[in-house]
Amino acid sequence: MVKGIEHTAIASPDPHKLARWYVEHLDFAINYQSAGSKTTFVKASDGSMIEIIESNSAPPAALDMKAAGLRHLAIAVTDFDAVYERLKGKGVSFLTEPEKKGGNSLVFFTDCDGNILHLLQREKPLP
């Protein structure tokens, strides 16, 4: 039986720096660091994880929110305004203006490596 997604991996030129960014900006915790590589897992309070692995030297693709493939990670929050203001105060780069529609609050932004993230507070969970 398939239970769900255990983690998503992000390749980074500096996995430890990116892991610290998730800890400092989004309250993730470092829950595993490989002894034999720079691989680091960060974990959110709900148990979801991101594996951060070392990238090769290939340049990243141009930022395009609608290109084929994985486009963003949605970060669920319980107090959108407070988290948005905290990120803004830390100089986070936002790609859109915050929106409130249908009881949901959302905004798109990037982490320190330029990966697209989606800050989201839903009034009601999806079915």
Image (spheres, rainbow, N blue to C red):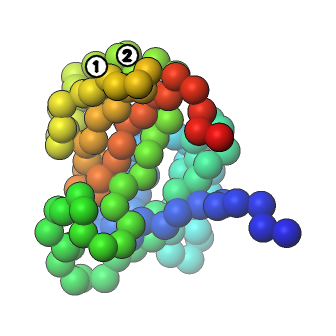
- Residue 62 at x, y = what percent? 14, 69
- Residue 98 at x, y = what percent? 25, 27
Picture layout, residue 55 above or below residue 26: below
Q: Is 111 or 32 nearer to us in this picture?
A: 111
Instruction: Quarter of the image for the C terminus: give it.
Output: top right
Q: Residues under labels 2 and 1: Cα distance?
A: 5 Å
Picture layout, residue 91 above or below residue 22: above
Disc 2 designates what residue? Answer: 82
Q: Relative to residue 120, is residue 88 drawn left or right?
A: left
Q: Is 124 or 2 nearer to us in this picture?
A: 124
The three-letter amino acid code for the residue at tag 1 is: Glu
The three-letter amino acid code for the residue at tag 2 is: Ala
Q: Is 48 or 39 nearer to us in this picture?
A: 48
Q: Is 57 or 64 nearer to us in this picture?
A: 64
Determine the residue located farthest toward the left in the rendered image: 62
Q: Residues within 10 Å of mark 1 (few under 14, many from 20)?
A: few
Residue 85 numbered mark, or none: 1
Q: Relative to residue 41, is residue 116 drawn left or right?
A: left
Q: Would you identify the image quadrant in which residue 86 lies?
A: top left
- Residue 35 at x, y = what percent? 59, 70
Q: Are marks 2 and 1 in contact (CB under 8 Å)?
A: yes
Q: Quick one: SS at disc 1?
A: helix
